[in-house]
Amino acid sequence: MYDVTIIGAGIVGTFIARELSKYQLNILLLDKENDVANGTTKANSAICHAGYDAEPNTLKARFNVEGNKMMEDICRELDVPFKRIGSLVVAFSQEEMVTIEELYQRGIANNVPNLKILNKKELVEKEPNISPNAVGALYAPTAGIMGPFELAFALAENAVDNGVELLLNNEVKKIDKLEEGYRIYTNNKEIDTKYVVNCAGVYADEIHNMVAEPQFKIVPRRGQYFLLDRIAGSTVNSVIFQCPVKNSKGVVVLPTVHGNLLVGPDAQDLDDKEDRDTTDDRLEYVRKSAYKTSEKIPFNTVITSFAGLRASPDTKDFIIGEIKGTKGFIDVAGIESPGLSASPAIGKYVAQLLKNIDGSFKENPEFKSTRKRAIHFMELSNEEKNEIIKKDPRYGRIICRCENITEGEIVDAIHRNVGGTTVDGIKRRVRPGMGRCQGGFCQPRVIEILARELGKDFTEIPKDGLNSNIAIRETK
Ligand SMILES: Cc1cc2nc3c(=O)[nH]c(=O)nc-3n(C[C@H](O)[C@H](O)[C@H](O)COP(=O)(O)OP(=O)(O)OC[C@H]3O[C@@H](n4cnc5c(N)ncnc54)[C@H](O)[C@@H]3O)c2cc1C
């Protein structure tokens, strides 16, 4: 019997797994997908919000501000990118300056440090490409940008290194209460566990309903984006919001940690929890809205578009806690934005919650807090490059010419303790296919390497999720 089973290996599940691995426990982290971070965690704005958006005294406000404070150190420990570049909420009229003042006051109430209201001159000094129609802004220096899926992979690797078991391709279908604990039925297995943590993203309401009366409903709220080439990355220096609109923080323009420019999202409530399609009309809305921020956004350098699904709860706040009358079953649901920013604090809180419920958790004296990322060949000095090629000639073969990724890096990403098994899994780990040609040149070679290293036929290598195989048969 496991002590704790965590359903959902997104940023929240991986943070909880890593936090719980600080104790001597039998922990299972399971997911229905074929990789970690294949839900909302793979498609969002990647902002570590400062914390002025959420209503004071909500879980969102509390965990956002706490999580923001923790994020940089954790990213350093796990060797993943994080940049504290600050955010701006820009006003385009005196009327909107009233909203800016409200956000400022809310930020003060939420204990967000160092907020400042900027006049037009100060704003233009920070952002020379801002629209001439801007009149002022709220500046939050503590906001940052991050790599959400890189962080989830790193957390999962570190958790596994510390004894957590990871089980992919297992969709939870049913849960029975036992005399002590729970029996979880997946499409492949029966799993007995003392405690359950439900962090199943857009499906968290359905998991909750397997053991208790319905208490909340999760609506998938889709957001669509453009990703622009690296040559566009310096259009802005910070994360630039407009004043919030109903249902979302509005369209944002920001550089990514890898130097691209990200523009989006819109907000559209759907019924289908799997619908991550992009659509012409919504992308056109994103493009037009972003021009309001800056007419200098070079949309002729778009390299891809994508969509993510917010797990939007009808309760309007995060739902975190033991279900009443269902001992040891913890919901971590409705984790829409700022869920990424809040995730370190949520992880810590949930681990403490379980510790209090059980009363006998013992610390793991062998807990290792650090994890090293793969070698980034192109960041090495010439001497280091020569040295590593001598040891492993695969680092001398470039596979992705846009991002300069070597075969050695791809092989490393496959054989890590939470290795990639899909084309997009490798892309998210070490970036072949993330560049201008979006895998046009390197994708067949990545498939070949995956097939060779995993001992599979090339037709068995999926692009991303289950049943997304690219090649069906050999033609010549
Ligand atoms: C458009 C958009 C923009 C956003 N921007 C930001 C931002 O800039 N900053 C920020 O802080 N937050 C942002 N967010 C929110 C943030 O992305 C989420 O809060 C966070 O990723 C949620 O992580 P999670 O682990 O709860 O969910 P997920 O990543 O969705 O993980 C849930 C996991 O559960 C698994 N699962 C579901 N059902 C089952 C089942 N039956 N059996 C087994 N496994 C199951 C799924 O496969 C999935 O991997 C944004 C969200 C969106 C959509």
Image (cartoon, rainbow, N blue to C red):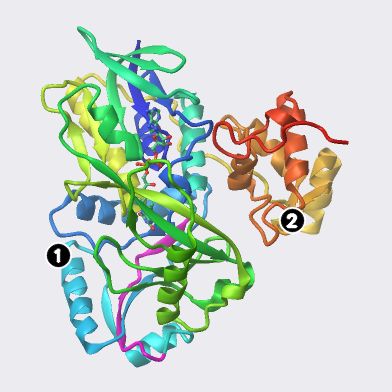
Q: Position of 444 compared to 273: left or right?
A: right
The residue that disc 2 covers is 404
Q: Quadrant of residue 121?
A: bottom left
Q: Residue at x 31, y 54 (%)?
A: 338
Q: Which residues are magenta?
A: 132-146
Q: Given the image, on which type of amino acid does mark 2 rest?
A: Asn
Q: Name the secondary structure under disc 1.
A: helix
Q: Given the image, on which type of amino acid does mark 1 rest?
A: Ala
Instruction: Give the quadrant of the C terminus.
Output: top right
Q: Residue at x 34, y 57 (%)?
A: 268
Q: Position of 352 compared to 144: left or right?
A: left
In the rendered image of this protein, does residue 118 appear above or below residue 328? Answer: below
Q: Can you give x and y, in whole percent of width and height, for residue 300 in the image?
A: 61, 74
Determine if residue 370 is in view: no
Q: Is residue 329 magenta?
A: no
In front here: 348 or 201? Answer: 201
In the rendered image of this protein, does residue 189 appear above or below residue 12? Answer: above
Q: Can you give x and y, in whole percent of width and height, for residue 47 in the image?
A: 40, 59
